[in-house]
Image (cartoon, helix red, strand yellow):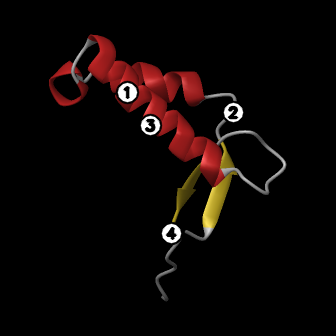
Amino acid sequence: MNYIFDISKTFHLKIAALRCHKSQIGTGEQAKKVEDWVRNMNLNMAKGKNFEIAEAFNLVEVPD
């Protein structure tokens, strides 16, 4: 991943959107496990950066 950015101010929205997909993540304890996994993944993406939680992508530039 070569493009990592701060999602500290919007992470709560990511979790709220995830919760809308009950058919995918389940409810109760199952949903909590998925939320925890996502949180930990995003926390790890921010390691070594000057922010707490991050989203990362591969940025691909297409030549003209």
Q: What residue type is disc 1 on?
A: Lys
Q: Which residue is drawn at the image coordinates 72% and 53% (left, top)?
A: 47
Indicate the position of residue 64 as horizontal and vertical percent values.
48, 88
Who's the residue at 29% across and 11% down the image? 28
For the question of whether residue 19 can be seen, the reply is no
Looking at the rendered structure, the secondary structure element under dot 1 is helix
Which one is in front in this view, the residue at disc 2 or the one at disc 3? 3
Q: Nearer the viewer, residue 41 or 29?
A: 29
Residue named by callout 1: 33
Q: Among all residues in the image, which is located at the extreme top?
A: 28
Q: Amino acid at mark 4?
A: Asn
- Badge 2 is on which residue? 8
Q: Position of residue 60 (x, y in %)?
A: 49, 76
**Mark 3: few/some/many CA within 10 Å (<14, 14-19, 20+):** few
Q: Which residue is mark 3?
A: 37
Q: Amino acid at mark 2?
A: Ser
